[in-house]
Amino acid sequence: MKINIACPSTGMQKVIEIDDERRLQNLYDRRMAQEIDGTILGDEFEGYILRISGGNDKQGFPMRQGVLTNTRVSLLCKKGHKAYRQRRAGERKRKSVRGCVVGADIAVLNLVITQIGPNTVPGLTDDQIPRRLGPKRANNIRKLFNLTK
């Protein structure tokens, strides 16, 4: 299983591959938005806390929050639903998505670092990438540069 780890504070992300079934066993039956301890992934993530933010199964179907199963289900989607874009006004369509529970047939699992541990991870927390885009709203630009009206 590939694990995609993102660090919002540095703007970096890293993909690691875990083949050890005993280490992956700790990730199974966890749900999206649940926080996990970093030592599950290895000793380099000791003290880190990570949040499960999603993933894809082996056929590429995305995980969907609120679908409480670890299998694939077919949902009737309409305008405004995730993973669906309507082609005509009022159109509804049945789309296949994964449940929000992590299972053995997940190919890629996305994790976000919520708390950084004491040691740095090379390629993830050792460097800083500047934000590519700035705010668009005037109030947010003022807040970024500490300006007044």
Image (spheres, grey):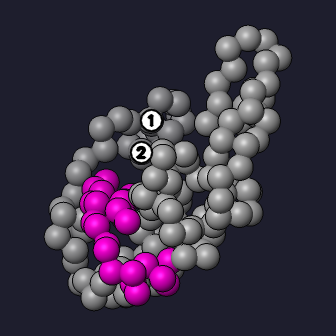
Q: Residues within 10 Å of mark 1 (few under 14, many from 20)?
A: few
**From the image, which quarter does the N terminus lie in?**
bottom left
Residue 9 visible? The answer is: no
**In the image, residue 49 lies at what x, y percent?**
45, 79
Q: Nearer the viewer, residue 50 or 76?
A: 76
Circles 1 and 2: CB atoms closer than 8 Å: yes
Q: Which residues are magenta?
A: 1-27
Residue 144, numbered circle:
2
**In the orientation shown, which residue stands out farthest toward the top?**
88
**In the image, residue 8 lies at what x, y percent?**
39, 58
Image height of 107 relative to 42, above or below: above
Total number of numbered discs in the rendering:
2
Helix, strand or loop under label 1: loop
Image height of 145 relative to 33, above or below: above
Q: Which residue is at 71% across, 49% downward?
A: 73
Location of mark 1 (residue):
135
